[in-house]
């Protein structure tokens, strides 16, 4: 079998995710940047809240990219599911190159029928709040 | 006078621009990526149409960034308004570094009361169509 | 409709493409590097012939990546199909960033049921020969 | 004596290593990316297993490159053989630049007659398994 079928998120799906994440941030009274990427880590949509700090732009995009490339939520679990110590977390981040692995929460893969079809990254609030916002976005799919 | 007032586009303004640009692209039956940046060239919003090619992501962002940083539409006019030949166009692009100057159409500054407050970059259609879509977005502000 | 179905090449498919491209290069008595990437431009497989020059490594990878991201063969046609002059070709290359667009032959998209599922990039021979080798690889799919 | 003889791995040797490493990964039921580089750290061959996560691509290549450049297995031993603490491990990684030194297992030099002629890097399983796969590949030489 030389090819296999796969799934992707449509523009309509992307809009639902983005709006639900923005609504969640608003309801939590936090100010964030939100990035959505496809399964290859390429940007699909992005929105920065009024007043969000500028470092949240690359951080939200890196979180989304990390969650897509590793197919796991960002954090100190390794891609294969074990806890990483500080050295391991930073060493794999450096090995993967700039903007590819993020070892704190806020990036969450979008999974459809067990397949990773992209990811959402949020930056600007506490990192557990960032993750909650990303999850709320994905729940709207 | 040691400080001066400035103008910026709000999230509501950004949404109007993005929606108007998306509507324009749809009415022209073209498939594009649209990026909106602030006056410092930092991303405010981004949307990729269903089916847009992946190189349109960095190109739309670079066009928006170029128009914001030079405060001029992207193209073969120099930032100070003179026509550039091929060497000049590519030399200034290389001098400014990756993704900072774009010398073909599709990036348009957002000007309010004579002040550049950001820019819109579009990629995916013919470059004159890209520019038209960016202008339609800005007209909605 | 929030998701849509898609296609990907399996490892078995990738191996067929790589072997057919290597066989073609051998039959042409040329020495090359061959890269195969997925639809997001991420490496699937790579092989460098005995004696191939080292610059062929990044060039083959960039050609494959370019053909995947633009969904077009590499060359001086723009992604939307028009002929580009020297300035346009180099300007879009710089706008897209390092290793993303290549404006000479040797990168060819892999298309299945009208959908781009990846690409092959070849470097080391004359660029028309590079393209021929990539096409021979894809024909084996 | 102004020149000296050197040894290199041929394409046939590279293929043996790659196939033996792929067979080992299969027998261990793990899904990985495998990179083989020459003594200068330049890619010779690469294969990504069906379903391997995308961050394994740059990580496998970085591990192979690190083992070739330091002529030592990747890990927290310094290139001169002493144990490094966390700061030393990350500091030398940053000093060497992106993708040049990796301080966890999975990159193994290929040594012939006491001379480093290249390296194998594996990513995707637990890092000790990655190393075992690289070693199995090299054993086939």
Image: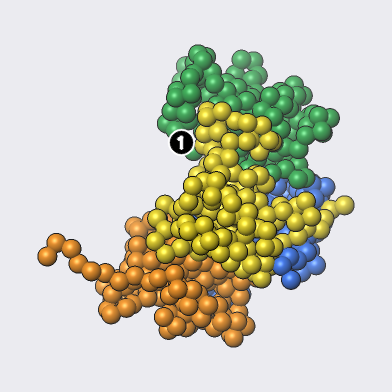
Chain colours: A yellow, B orange, C blue, D green
Callout 1: few (<14), some (14-19), or many (20+) C-alpha neighbours within 10 Å? few
Q: Nearer the viewer, residue D102 or C2?
A: C2
Q: Left of A50 or right of it: where is D74?
A: right
Q: Residue furthest bottom?
A: B27
Q: Can you say whether A48 is above or below C54 in the image?
A: below
Local SS, label 1:
loop
Residue drawn at point x = 48 percent, y = 23 percent = D86
Does residue A29 appear anywhere in the picture? yes
Numbered circles on residues, count: 1
Q: Position of residue C114 (x, y in %)?
A: 76, 69
Identify the image quadrant of the C terminus of chain D.
Answer: top right
Instruction: Write down the chain letter for disc 1.
Output: D
Does residue C123 appear anywhere in the picture? no
Q: Left of D124 or right of it: where is D80?
A: left
Residue drawn at point x = 12 percent, y = 65 percent = B1
Residue drawn at point x = 37 percent, y = 74 percent = B109
* Location of mark 1 (residue): D97
Q: Can you say whether B122 is above or below D130 in the image?
A: below
Q: Position of residue A134 (x, y in %)?
A: 59, 54
Residue D26 location, quadrant: top right
Q: Residue furthest right?
A: A1
């Amino acid at each position: 079998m030389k090819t296999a079928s796969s799934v992707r998120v449509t523009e309509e799906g992307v809009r639902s995710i983005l709006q639900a994440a923005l609504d969640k941030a608003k309801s939590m009274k936090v100010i964030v940047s939100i990035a959505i990427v496809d399964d290859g880590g390429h940007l699909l949509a992005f929105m920065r809240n009024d007043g969000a700090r500028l470092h949240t732009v690359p951080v939200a995009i890196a979180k989304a990219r990390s969650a897509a490339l590793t197919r796991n939520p960002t954090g100190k679990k390794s891609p294969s599911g074990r806890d990483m110590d500080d050295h391991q977390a930073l060493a794999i981040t450096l090995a993967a190159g700039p903007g590819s692995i993020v070892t704190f929460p806020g990036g969450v893969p979008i999974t459809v029928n067990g397949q990773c079809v992209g990811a959402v990254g949020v930056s600007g609030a506490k990192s557990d709040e960032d993750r909650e916002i990303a999850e709320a976005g994905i729940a709207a799919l």
